[in-house]
Image: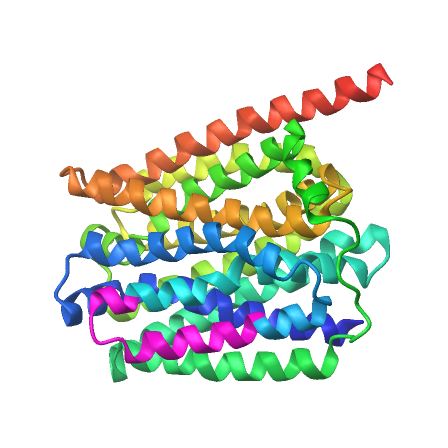
Amino acid sequence: MRLPIFALAVASFGIGTTEFVIMGLLPDVARDLRVSIPQAGMLVSGYAIAVTIGAPILAILTARLPRKATLLALMALFILGNGLCAVAPNYGLLMAARVVTAFAHGTFFGVAAVVAASLVPHGQRGQAIALVFAGLTLANVLGVPAGTALGQIAGWRATFWGVVVIGVAAISAIGIWVPAGLPAPAGRLITEFRVLANRQVLMAMLISVLCSVSMFTIFTYITPLLETVAGLTPHQVTLALLAFGVGLTVGNLLGGWLGDWKLMPAVMGLLAMLACVLAAFGFACHAPIPAVATMVLWGIIAFALVSPLQMRVLETARRAPNLASILNQGAFNLGNATGAWVGAAVIGAGFAYTVLPFIGAGVALLALALSAVSHVTDRAAVVGQ
């Protein structure tokens, strides 16, 4: 079943590229469309909010579609949205095109995670989900640096045309390799939505939100931070993003293994390390080599959390895995939007970029506290049985 998962990873590579490459293009987009860096940063928030809103809407619209048909329809929407981004003549229309693209994001990853988990034995679910999300991490290793470089050479619009090509390759791979016999989710949709009354499901999603806030408060503005604080040139920023992407890839694969080993202890340990590394980045970002080295470590830890958090939601919502998986993607992106907004508010208030890592560290500590509460609740429930 490696080829179906590979097809899903190709699609996640394209989705990850279009989501994250805007960070590397922020100065170019801001100059071309005559907006400020914080305004350009809201393209990240707009995308993430659209994922959050679009996930439940498309969950309803695709609830009774076979999973392969759902994946193909979502990739068609993804291709359309990126084409509109490439031709958008102004900031408002670019934001609208990003919203169209984002509507495919949350539902695709939610359905893809469930499909990947269904294609492997139970004890390998974390690794299967990690392989799907490997496309997302490789987007940061290859897609974002390549897209940033292409945008600097040929203009930011060329980057979105490149993503369209990736989308066409992905929809072709899904059409060829993903099995056609995957059924639509069973049961009534209203019954699935009742899973949101489960406190553990809600806590799991809130932890996902906080993890994304801790990352995107900083990562949204990573290019101007590295240029103005660490003193990196645009070319060196591209290399730094490449190194960060390598860290994300290593962390993603590590997270799949940790999730299959000891889920909640792994989540709590990673969150504790994340808080420490982000605080260290607040000091290290003043010099090029320490900044990049700390970024790599940050990337490893941050994406080691992705697969375990997705598994945690599936574990706590066994009666509605499809819906819960989709909604958790909305949770991740609600955190993305909130983080980008927090970063914009901090910068807009006159604070230095160096404040952002310390805010991210504080949010990671909050996620750690919530994870500890959730884990203790689990253990109390087992004792009480």
Does 299 appear above or below 167? above
Residue situated in front as seen by the camera: 58 or 343: 58
Please tell me whether the stretch drawn in magenta is mainly helix, strand or loop: helix
**Res. 144 image quadrant:** bottom left
Side (left or right) of 121 relative to 66 = right
Q: Quadrant of the N terminus?
A: bottom right
Q: Is residue 89 magenta?
A: yes
Residues in magenta, as a range: 74-94
Q: How is the image coloured?
A: rainbow
Q: Position of residue 338 (x, y in %)?
A: 37, 42
Q: Quadrant of the C terminus?
A: top right
Q: Position of residue 169 (x, y in %)?
A: 57, 84
Please name the residue shown 78% across and 76% down the image: 180
Q: Position of residue 17 (x, y in %)?
A: 45, 69
Q: Is residue 378 visible?
A: yes
Q: Quick one: which residue is furthest to the top in this view?
A: 384
Q: Is residue 353 magenta?
A: no
Side (left or right) of 294 relative to 170 = left
Residue situated in front as seen by the camera: 160 or 276: 160
Residue situated in front as seen by the camera: 243 or 355: 355
Side (left or right) of 132 relative to 318 = left
Q: Is residue 150 visible?
A: no
Q: Position of residue 212 (x, y in %)?
A: 46, 44
Callout count: 0
Please name the residue shown 73% across and 25% down the image: 378
